[in-house]
Image (tube, grey):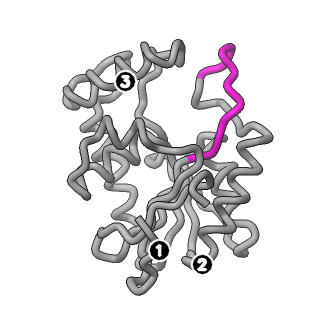
Amino acid sequence: MGNQTHRPPGLILVRHSVPDIREDRPNPEWRLSEAGRADARRLGARLAAYAPQAAVASPEPKALETGRIIAEPLGLRVEVDADLSEHRRPGLRYGERQVFHDIMADWFAHPAERRFDGESLDEAHDRFAAALERLDESTTLVASHGTVMTLFLSRRLGLEPFALWKSLGLPEAFVMDGEGGLIDRVGVRDA
């Protein structure tokens, strides 16, 4: 995307960093791996130029840790908002990658459907968007998750949701201006 800092940022959406996948635990309980913590520090260094004034995160450990790692060198305290949590799908376990991708591709094509004892993608979008609407006017760093970020960004930017979801890095940030336009897409692998 390129750095277009001539427009001031209003929102910095961060997908959490690489988790320590524990198949014996539900994924909302996963923490960051050592590599994930290192990548979060690298992403934080790249995001410092956007000078966030506030930070908020999902309460899920992998997102909260990512937010704290990025916010701490900036002198920011991370607030927690449960509405920034990942799409709620408690009956879906992370398994074989291709099977998971097939499930998600079909679900993105049918966003009103509730599956796996959870919320629909439309409900997840509305919950996440409402949380973002509650943020103040300052540039805010939001540490969250891939599916809810995809739902929000694809609808705001007119992108195909499944393709965007598959393209997301761990971690990765989308820097948006105050009007909701994309300023930059920042990852640690494209540095």
Q: What quarter of the picture does the C terminus occupy?
A: bottom right
Contact between marks 1 and 2 (CB within 8 A): the answer is yes
- Residue density around tag 3, few if under 14, some if 14–19, many if 20 or more, within 10 Å: some
Gap in angstroms between the C-alphas marked 2 and 3: 38 Å
Gap in angstroms between the C-alphas marked 3 and 1: 38 Å
- Mark 2 or mark 3, earlier in chain: 2
Residue 15 to residue 48: above or below: above
Q: Where does the magenta region start and end?
A: 16-26
Residue at horizontal 35%, vertical 25%? 104
Residue tagged 2: 49
Q: Amino acid at mark 1?
A: Asn
Q: Secondary structure at mark 3?
A: loop
Q: What quarter of the picture does the N terminus occupy?
A: bottom left
Label the magenta part by its dominant secondary structure: loop
Residue at horizontal 80%, vertical 40%? 34
Residue 50 to residue 186: above or below: below
Residue 105: x percent and y percent? 30, 25
- Mark 1 or mark 2, earlier in chain: 1
Image disc number at residue 118: 3
Q: Secondary structure at mark 1?
A: loop
Please tell me how many numbered marks the rendered image carries: 3
Q: Which label sits in the foreground, 2 or 3?
A: 2
Residue at horizontal 57%, vertical 72%? 54
Q: Secondary structure at mark 2?
A: helix
Image disc number at residue 3: 1
Q: Amino acid at mark 2?
A: Ala
Q: Quadrant of residue 26?
A: top right
